[in-house]
Amino acid sequence: MRRRTLAPFGRRSVELTDNRAVGAYSVLTCADRDGPAPRPGQFYMLAACERWGGGEGDRPFVPRACSFMRATADEDGGVRLEFLLEDVGPGTARLCALHAGERLWLLGPLGVGFAPPPAGHDALLVGGGIGIAPLAGWQDELRAAGISARTLLGFRDASHATGATLMHDPSVATDDGSQGLHGRVTELLAAERGTHATVFSCGPPAMLEAVRALCAERGIAAQLALESGMACGFGACFGCVVPTRAGYLRLCLDGPVIDAAQLETALVAGAGH
Amino acid sequence: MRRRTLAPFGRRSVELTDNRAVGAYSVLTCADRDGPAPRPGQFYMLAACERWGGGEGDRPFVPRACSFMRATADEDGGVRLEFLLEDVGPGTARLCALHAGERLWLLGPLGVGFAPPPAGHDALLVGGGIGIAPLAGWQDELRAAGISARTLLGFRDASHATGATLMHDPSVATDDGSQGLHGRVTELLAAERGTHATVFSCGPPAMLEAVRALCAERGIAAQLALESGMACGFGACFGCVVPTRAGYLRLCLDGPVIDAAQLETALVAGAGH
Amino acid sequence: MIDFCGIELAGRVINASGTFDAIAARRTFGESLRDRFPFAAFVSKTVTVAQREGNPPPRLWELPAGLMNSIGLPNRGLAGFIEHDLPELAGLPAPLIVNVMGFDPAQFVLLIEAFGELAEVAALELNVSCPNVETGLEFGADPQATAALLERVRPLTDKPLIVKLTPNAADPPAVAEAAQEAGADALSLINTLRGMALDPSTARPWLGGETGGVSGPSVRAIALAQVHAVAQRVTIPIVGMGGVQSGRHAADLLSVGAALVAVGTESFRDPAAAIRITAELDGIEIPGKSGVSVREAG
Amino acid sequence: MIDFCGIELAGRVINASGTFDAIAARRTFGESLRDRFPFAAFVSKTVTVAQREGNPPPRLWELPAGLMNSIGLPNRGLAGFIEHDLPELAGLPAPLIVNVMGFDPAQFVLLIEAFGELAEVAALELNVSCPNVETGLEFGADPQATAALLERVRPLTDKPLIVKLTPNAADPPAVAEAAQEAGADALSLINTLRGMALDPSTARPWLGGETGGVSGPSVRAIALAQVHAVAQRVTIPIVGMGGVQSGRHAADLLSVGAALVAVGTESFRDPAAAIRITAELDGIEIPGKSGVSVREAG
Ligand SMILES: Cc1cc2nc3c(=O)[nH]c(=O)nc-3n(C[C@H](O)[C@H](O)[C@H](O)COP(=O)(O)OP(=O)(O)OC[C@H]3O[C@@H](n4cnc5c(N)ncnc54)[C@H](O)[C@@H]3O)c2cc1C
Ligand SMILES: Cc1cc2nc3c(=O)[nH]c(=O)nc-3n(C[C@H](O)[C@H](O)[C@H](O)COP(=O)(O)OP(=O)(O)OC[C@H]3O[C@@H](n4cnc5c(N)ncnc54)[C@H](O)[C@@H]3O)c2cc1C
Ligand SMILES: Cc1cc2nc3c(=O)[nH]c(=O)nc-3n(C[C@H](O)[C@H](O)[C@H](O)COP(=O)(O)O)c2cc1C
Ligand SMILES: Cc1cc2nc3c(=O)[nH]c(=O)nc-3n(C[C@H](O)[C@H](O)[C@H](O)COP(=O)(O)O)c2cc1C
Ligand code: FES
Ligand code: FES
C-alpha cells in the first residue's frame, strides 16, 4: 500500500455538503470533485473561503491542518471527504461554524499516512479525543483487508465519548468515568497482552508519549500520528518540525505518521492545547 | 432645539431586532435600551460584536460611522434606532449581513445635528443616495413642528430609488431616468424658486458641492451633512478633518452637519466611493 | 497605588499620546467621562512650540488589524495649549503628562522650560520621532542625538522626563541606554511604524502626508519585542505600548519588563477600552518566576 | 520577457527566500508543480557555509493578519546544498537565484566564490540580516558594514548580486545607497520585522528562538513605505516584497519603484498563490503618470 497520495498543485474550493454534531465534535463533509483518494493518516489544510480572519485575536490567518476521517468515492468521480473537528480556537471555531452550502479552501492530501502492519500482525488502534479522526478510515481499510483492528479510545467526558460511535466496536475509557473504564486509554493499552500487533495511535501529546513509552518498553512497533503547529502543510515554511533521533523532521512532509522508534519523545513543543 | 445629545461613555452592545432590504439598501433596526434620544443629523459608530475583521482586505478594523435614520421611543424606555446602510466595502458589508438576534457595538449619539430653520423659513431637504438617512428623521421632526419640509431626492437607478419610499412625498430624480426626473437632484433644486427656505442636504461629495455652490450663488442658507473617513467618532484621532474657512475641523466633533457658509468646498479628500 | 517616577498612579494603564482628546471626549460624553475616567494618568497629544494645522486629509487608512495615520501633530502650540487646554486637562481625575516635541533642541528647551514650571504638569514625555535636520533621520533613531538632547534639557526641570522611543530604529535598546545615561527618568515605546498605502484609483499615496504611522494589533508583536529588548538594557521604568487590546496584551508587556502600559488605537474602537483592559489585567497574575518581574519605578 | 540584471524572466513575480521549498513541493505535488510553476525565478532558502538544524520548536506564531517565525535558517550547508539540492533546483523551469548568508565577511566570500562558478546559478541574493559581531546589530542595518561587505565580495563574481535589506534599520535607503555604490546589482526588501509573543500559559517567549520575524499582510504598509523610500534613492532594480496577497498589492510595489515582486507568506496559504497574483497583475495598468514608472533592470 502506498502511504502518500500526491496532491493537486494549489488549493481548491470545495462545497461543504454537511456539518453535523457528534457529541462535542463536528463532522464536516465536503465534495472534493477534483481530488484524488487520500491514504489514511494523510491530512489536508483547510480554510473557510469567506471570512477567514476576524475571529478571536484577529485570527485565523493560515489554514488549519486536519486529518480526513473517511474518504469515499463520490457518484461523479470525485471524493467525499469527512473531517472530524473540535473547536479549540479561532480556526477550528470558524470551520465548525460553517453551514452546508458554504465553501472551503482545501489543499491536499498531504504528508504520509499509516503503513500496514507486517504480515501476520494485528493492528491495535489507540486514540485519544479528536485523535480518532485518522484512525476511523484506517480501521475501515484494515478490516476490509481482513486485518484485525481492535480499537481503544480515551475521552475526557461523555459528550466527547460520543465520538466513539464513529468507529467500529471500540473499548472506551473516560477521564470522568462517564463511559467505559474510569481512567486513561493507556490503561486499556497496558492491559493488552498480545505482542503480535502493531499499534497505530493518535491523540494528545501526553497520551502519545505514554503510548510510545509503553510500546518501547514492550518492544511493540508503533506508528504515531503527531500534531504540530503548521503554516503551509507542504514543506515550505520549516515551521512544523519535531525532533527525532535523526534531527528535526518536517511533520507535514515526513509525517504526520511517524514510526515511534524514530522518536525520543512524542511531546512536541507548542502542540496540543 | 439642542443640536447635540451627549453620548453615554463607552460603546455598548445592542441587539439587532430587524434587518430588511429596501431596494439596494438595508434598514437595520436595533434596541438601544440604555441610549438617549439622538438629534437628527447625529451619528453612531457601529461594529458587529462578532467577526469584525476578516473581510475583504482583512478589514474592517475600526467601527463605521452611520447616521441614524429614525429614532423612536421603545416600550421599555429605551430607543429603537433605525439605520440605513449601503454595502460599499468590508465594514458596511459585514453590517448588512447581520441577522436579527445578532449583536452590534454602538457608540453615540455623536457629533452635532441639524439646526432648525429660522422662524418663518421652510425647510428644503435635498438628498442623494444613502444621504437620505439623516434627512428622514429630520423631515419627521420638522413636519411634526409644522414646518414645511419638501424633499428632493436623487438616485442612481430604480433599485436605489426604492429608498425614496422611506420619506414623505419626495420629488425624485434618477441618473438613468428609471424614476422621476431623468437627471440630477440638483436640477430639481435649481428649479426651486422660493428663497425663504433653508436647505438641508446630505449625499455624495459632488452632489453636496453642487448644492453648496447653488445655494451660495442664490444666497440660500444651507446645512450640509458631510462624510469623511473616521476612526473614532469622538474627536480622539484627528483623522476626520475637513477644510473650512477657519481651518481644519474634526467632522465627528464639530460636524457632521456644517453650515455651508463655512466651506470653500464640500469636496472632502478621501470621502465617497 | 503605583509609584511611577515619584508620581502616584491608581493603576498601570494610561493612554498613548495622541489617541485620546479628553476635551473633545467631554464635549461628546459630558460628565460621564469624568465619572469613569479610563486612565491612571492622562498623556496629552504632542505639543509643539508653534501652532500646527496638521497634515492635509485624508489622514487615515485602515490596515489588516491596524490603522495608519498621518495626522501631522495638529495642536494649538505652546501658548495656546497653556491658555486653552491646560486648565481643563489639569482638572482631570488623573495626573497629567504633557507630551512635547521640538524640531530642534532649542525648541525642546523652550517647551521643557515652560512646562517644567507648571504645577499642573506631573511629567513630560519627549516625542523624539521628529526628523533631525543634521542626519535626516529621526532624533530618536540615533543614540548620540538622543543623548545630546537629554543632556541639554535634563538640567532644566526636576519633573520626570519620559523619552518616547521610535520603532523606526536599528537598535532601540542602544537609544534607550543612551537616554538613561543622559538622565531620562523613564522610557515609553513604541511609537508608530512608518508605512504607506496607495489610492487604488490613482496609484498615488492615499495619505495627505504621503507616509503614515502604523499602529494597532498588527504592530503588537513588534512592540513586545522592542519593549523586551529595551528592558534588558535599562533599569528605569518603561511605558509599554503598541496594539494593546486586552488585559492579556497588557500583561505581556508587563511580563517582559514594562512598568505601565498605554492604550492607543484600541480607544478608537471603544473610548472605554482602557477600563476593560484595566479590569482584565487585575485578574491576571504576572508570573515573577518568568525571570522578568514587574519593574517598579524608583 | 523581462530583463532583470541581464536575466530573462517570464514575469515579474518570484518567490521570497525561505517561503517555498521546490523539492518538498515536488514530493507533495509531483509533476503538477512543474506544469504550473508559479514563479518567474526561483529563490532558494538561505544557504550558509555550515549545515544548520535551525531553531528549536515552536517556530511559528500566528498574528492578526500575519505570521511570526523563528525558523533559524536550517539548511544543508554549502557542500550539502550543492550536492543534494542544486541538481534538482537547476532543473526547475525558472532561473535559479541562490540566497546566501555568512556570519562574517569571510563566510560570504566562501559562499560567493563557490556559487559564482556554477552555471546553474543565475544570480545571488545576499541575506545581510545576520548579526554583525562588531556592532551587535544586523549587518544590513548599517550602511558602512554593508558597503564593506559588498566591496569585498563584488570582485569575486560576475553574477548579479542582490542585496536583501532588513527593515529593522533606521534608514534602509542609506543602506541601499551604500550597497549600490559598493557594486550591488539589485536590492530586495523587506525581510521580516523582529517580533515576539509570549506563551499565554507561562508568560515566557513562545518561540524556541525567543524572537521571530513578522511577515504577511500586517507588514504590507511598512514594506511599501520602505520600497518607496529606497526607490527614491537608488537606480538599480528592486525586488519588492512584504505581505503581497494580490495583483493589486504587487502593482502597488511596482508603482512605487519595484522591478519585480516576491510572494512569501501568501504561498503558505496557497502554494499556487503566485499564479493567481501574476494573472491579476497582468490585468492592472501601472500608471506611468503617477511619477514612479515601473523601473526596468539595466
Ligand atoms: C497533521 C494534523 C492533523 C490534524 N487533524 C485534526 C483533526 O482531524 N481534527 C481536529 O480538530 N484537529 C486536527 N488537528 C489540529 C488542528 O490543526 C488544530 O487544532 C488547529 O490548528 C487549531 O487551530 P485554532 O485556531 O482552532 O486554535 P489555536 O488558537 O491555533 O490553538 C491551538 C494551539 O495553538 C497554540 N496557539 C495559541 N495561539 C497561537 C498563535 N497565535 N499562534 C500559534 N499557535 C497558537 C496553543 O498551543 C493552542 O492550544 C490536526 C493537526 C495536524 C498537524
Ligand atoms: C457622519 C457619517 C455618517 C454616515 N452615515 C451613513 C449611513 O447612514 N449609511 C451608510 O451606509 N453610510 C454612512 N456613512 C458612510 C459609511 O461610514 C462608509 O460608507 C463606511 O465607513 C464604509 O466602510 P466600508 O468598510 O464598507 O467601505 P470602505 O472600503 O472603507 O470604503 C469606503 C471608502 O473608503 C476609502 N477606502 C478604501 N480602502 C480604505 C482603507 N483601507 N482605509 C481607509 N479608507 C479606505 C475609499 O474611498 C472607499 O471608497 C456615514 C459616514 C459618516 C462620516
Ligand atoms: C491617530 C494617532 C495619533 C497619534 N499621535 C501621537 C502624538 O501626537 N504623539 C505621540 O507621541 N504619539 C502619537 N501616536 C502614537 C501613539 O501614542 C502610540 O505610540 C502608537 O499608536 C502605538 O500604540 P497603539 O498601537 O496602542 O495605538 C499617535 C497614534 C495614532 C494612532
Ligand atoms: C517562514 C519564513 C522563512 C523565511 N526564511 C527566509 C530565509 O531563509 N532567507 C531570507 O532571506 N528570508 C527569509 N524569509 C523572509 C521572506 O523571504 C520575506 O522577506 C518576508 O517574509 C516578507 O515577505 P512576505 O510578507 O510576503 O512573507 C522567511 C520568511 C518566512 C515567513
Ligand atoms: S507546515 Fe510548513 S513546513 Fe510543515
Ligand atoms: S473620527 Fe477621530 S477625530 Fe473624528
Image (spheres, coloured by chain):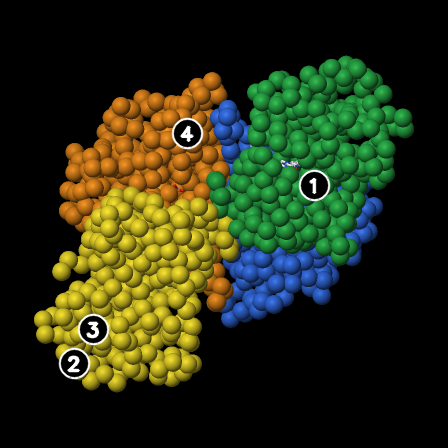
Chain colours: A yellow, B green, C blue, D orange
Q: Which residue is mark 4?
A: D251
Tell me, for residue A268, which label it has, or none. Answer: none
Three-letter code for the amino acid on which mark 4 is drawn: Ala
Work out whether residue A105 or residue A237 is closer to the camera in this orientation and state it: A105
Q: Nearer the viewer, residue C49 or B16?
A: B16
Q: Are marks 2 and 4 on the same chain?
A: no
Which chain letter matches label 4? Answer: D
The mark lying in front, picked from 1 and 2, is 1
Whether residue D79 is visible, yes or no, is no
Q: Chain of mark 1?
A: B
Q: Amino acid at mark 2?
A: Thr
> Circle 2 sits on which residue?
A195
**Does residue B145 appear to the left or right of C253 in the view shown?**
right
Q: Nearer the viewer, mark 4 or mark 3?
A: 3
Residue for point 11% across, 70% down: A118
**C195 displayed left or right of B144:** left
Estimate the spatial distance between the alpha carbons at disc 1 and disc 3, rounded to whole Å. 64 Å
